[in-house]
Image: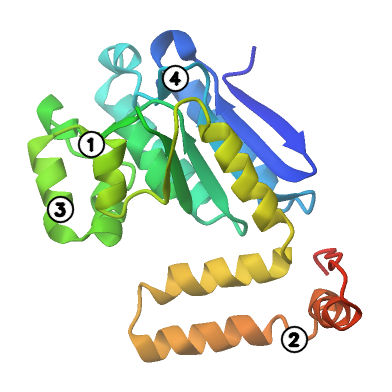
Amino acid sequence: MNEVEWERREGISILTLSRPQVYNALNLPMLEELGRIVRELIHSKATRVVVITGSGEKAFCSGADLKERRGMSEEQVRRYIYTIRETFQAIARLPKPVIAAVNGVALGGGMELALACDLRIADEHAVFGLTETSLGIIPGAGGTQRLARLVGQAKAKELIFSARRITAAEALEMGMLNRVAKEETVMKTALEWAEMINQNAPLALAQAKFAIDYGLEVDLDTGLALETKAYEGLIPTKDRLEGLDAFREKRKPIYLGE
């Protein structure tokens, strides 16, 4: 059985972390498998939206596999940290929207995985936490950076310094989540969002994500220049003309990603 299950639907890929017996903890083989899939998805025209979730009813992902970690040398720990950081960064940089369907606990690296996604939908009973300081370390897969950018420096420091766990309702209130779903409906909600996004032009989605993500890292004038560059890249596309034709003909557009 694969440690990451990859289900392909029309326009949508569903990636399921599949180690429910250990709350979908991230060991090195799972990370390497996840990284391999993400590399395939970069150039996949068949997938326009990605949904990431966890197997079972209790956990999205409980973070690093600490049993595996205890047997690692310092050099192996460094390799693991490099692998998890680069894998999550690859997810964040996928040229297509990625939705985290958080179906249970998301702690440590599990919360960092959710933060690397573009949109986050959580079960009402989900629990979040960057608990690394209670273990003598810090978040090492983007948590210190992505959380602060998402909820602000003060709130990020509060959560990381205290290692406090928070509910889905708290996460929604501070702006970390896009939606809280009622019990056992998180995948249904995530797939509804994915279907809605899947109807839109894939090249436009990629350029919109690029403009937002990179624009946040620069001053406003530079961000506006990035937006203009992204827009100009869409002008010669067949999808842009298809959108205009469909509007004129009062029909749904058929986007081919060209």
Q: Is residue 190 above or below residue 4?
A: below
Q: Is residue 222 above or below residue 59?
A: below
Question: In this rendering, which labeled residue sits more in front, label 1 or label 3?
Answer: 3
Q: Where is residue 206, by image quadrant? A: bottom right
Q: Where is residue 215, by image quadrant? A: bottom left
Q: Looking at this view, is 71 or 110 the one in front?
A: 110
Local packing at callout 3 (Cα closer than 10 Å; few below 14, some 14-19, many 20+) is some
- Type of amino acid at the residue the image marks with label 1: Leu
Give the spatial CA distance, label 3 vs label 2: 41 Å
Which badge, 1 or 3, is on the more N-terminal residue? 1
Disc marking residue 155 = 3
Q: Which residue is mark 4?
A: 24
Expressed as whole percent of the image width and height from the top left, the position of residue 220 reads: 36, 87
- Type of amino acid at the residue the image marks with label 2: Ile
Residue in view at x 24 percent, y 53 percent:
174
Q: Is residue 171 left or right of residue 153?
A: right
The quarter of the rendered structure image containing the N terminus is: top right
Give the spatial CA distance, label 4 vs label 3: 27 Å
| Residue 78 is at least partly visible in this image | no
Give the spatial CA distance, label 1 vs label 3: 12 Å
Which badge, 1 or 4, is on the more N-terminal residue? 4
- Type of amino acid at the residue the image marks with label 3: Lys
| Residue 11 is at least partly visible in this image | yes
Which badge, 3 or 2, is on the more N-terminal residue? 3
Q: Which residue is mark 2?
A: 235
Which badge, 2 or 1, is on the more N-terminal residue? 1
Which badge, 4 or 3, is on the more N-terminal residue? 4
Give the spatial CA distance, label 2 vs label 4: 43 Å
Disc marking residue 130 = 1
Expressed as whole percent of the image width and height from the top left, the position of residue 36 reads: 62, 36
